[in-house]
Image (cartoon, rainbow, N blue to C red):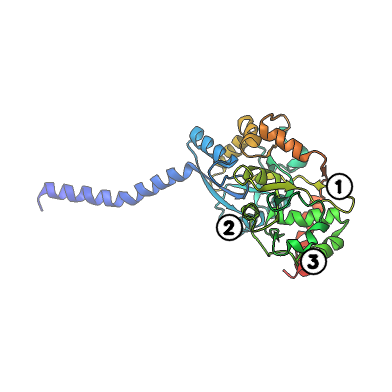
């Protein structure tokens, strides 16, 4: 073989050997500029106009880090992260209570106090620094304003025959807002058993299980359902494109509407593949700009006490909450007994 030909062949062989290494390095570099978020639904807009849409876009523009987003029910996201515990795929986990506490109890979250978390009230963050609220929110229900002249007032009204197959709530233990139905009923009826007795009766009108709360509002807007559960932030944001959607809060026997805080709480996943990028995203979400946009774009409430929104949404939300009693659930009890409560709910409703 001529010497020149031999040189070319040797060079080509070297390139072939080097090619896989080059590809691997390129892939690794691309992965380094990514962050994966597992989140409960509600903060991403149906038409790309939600709080997540704006925040992720701005974050990517500012940092060059691509956000990979996976959405599902709160319980579903925690279960997925738990299955992947030996080989984590997510960097940031965002869920509603009591699932964020559940994730913490399973060792799925590592300690990290994002910049701005000092301005988050103590009730809205973990004492050990494993999670903090990024968007404050409240549990609620929605009704179809076109079909119903006014919102129902009490839980008892929902037992009326006109709601048969026109009422649905997401599944406790799977969806955060579904679990909230059980928590609120236990509060309003004065205990677990009276709440279960009521929900057992309500089952006659209930369409059936739903893993996602976000999918119920469109059905209410179209009139397929008259009533469904939800939360203030998500439903207020949805009402911009769903004109028949109204928000209300069921009252107990005393006639006083009640609700409780149900914040979107975020934590850094233990042994996250891109922990540093996860920290940067958490810092960004709790930053002044992003928090100012919570009501303006997301229809929710800022998690920071030093951010005072004055936009039209903030004013409308304040009016909506006027006269509604806000109670604080015993999250430690709920976290400890959630599995038992859900099993009791299944027995009471035949689910």
Labels 3, 1: front one: 1
Q: CA distance from mark 3 to mark 1?
A: 23 Å
**On the rendered image, what quadrant is the C terminus found in?**
bottom right
Sequence-first tag of 2 and 3: 2
**Dividing the picture into quarters, in which one does residue 322 lie?**
top right
Residue 286 seen: no
**Percent position of residue 2, x then y:** 9, 50
How much space separates mark 2 and mark 1, taking CA atoms? 44 Å
Q: Earlier in the sequence, mark 2 or mark 1?
A: 2
Q: Could you tell me which residue is drawn at 47 percent across and 36 percent down?
A: 64
The secondary structure type at the circle numbered 3 is helix
Q: Residue at x 68, y 50 (%)?
A: 146
* Residue corresponding to mark 3: 200
Report which residue position mark 2 lands on.
84
Q: Which tag is nearer the camera, tag 2 or tag 3?
A: 3
x, y percent for residue 44: 58, 45
Q: Quadrant of residue 26?
A: top left
The residue located at (36%, 48%) in the rendering is 23
Q: Which residue is mark 1?
A: 256
Q: Position of residue 128 (x, y in %)?
A: 73, 43
Of label 3 and label 1, which has the lower sequence position? 3
């Amino acid at each position: 073989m001529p010497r020149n030909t031999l040189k070319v062949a040797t060079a080509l062989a070297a390139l072939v050997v080097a090619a896989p290494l080059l590809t691997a390095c390129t892939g690794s570099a691309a992965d380094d500029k990514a962050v994966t978020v597992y989140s409960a639904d509600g903060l991403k807009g149906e038409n790309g106009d939600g709080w997540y849409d704006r925040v992720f876009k701005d974050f990517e523009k500012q940092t060059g880090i691509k956000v990979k987003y996976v959405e599902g029910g709160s319980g579903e996201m925690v279960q997925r992260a738990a299955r992947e515990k030996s080989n984590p795929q997510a960097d940031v986990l965002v869920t509603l209570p009591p699932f964020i506490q559940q994730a913490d109890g399973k060792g799925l979250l590592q300690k990290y106090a994002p910049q701005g978390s000092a301005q988050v009230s103590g009730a809205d963050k973990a004492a050990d620094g494993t999670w903090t609220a990024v968007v404050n929110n409240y549990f609620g229900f929605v009704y179809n304003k076109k079909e119903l002249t006014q919102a129902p007032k009490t839980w008892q009204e929902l037992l009326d025959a006109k709601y048969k197959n026109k009422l649905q709530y997401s599944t406790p233990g799977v969806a955060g807002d579904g679990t909230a139905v059980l928590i609120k009923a236990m509060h309003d009826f004065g205990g677990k058993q009276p709440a279960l007795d009521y929900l057992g009766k309500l089952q006659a009108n209930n369409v059936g299980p739903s893993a996602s709360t976000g999918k119920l509002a469109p059905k209410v807007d179209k009139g397929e359902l008259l009533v469904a559960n939800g939360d203030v932030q998500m439903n207020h944001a949805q009402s911009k494109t769903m004109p028949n959607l109204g928000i209300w809060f069921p009252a107990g026997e005393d006639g006083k509407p009640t609700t409780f805080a149900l914040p979107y709480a975020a934590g850094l996943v233990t042994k996250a593949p891109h922990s540093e990028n996860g920290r940067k995203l958490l810092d960004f979400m709790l930053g002044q700009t992003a928090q100012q946009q919570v009501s303006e774009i997301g229809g929710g409430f800022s998690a920071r006490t030093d951010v005072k929104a004055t936009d039209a949404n903030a004013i409308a939300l304040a009016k909506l909450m006027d006269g509604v009693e806000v109670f604080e659930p015993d999250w430690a009890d709920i976290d400890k007994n959630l599995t038992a409560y859900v099993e009791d709910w299944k027995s009471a409703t035949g689910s």
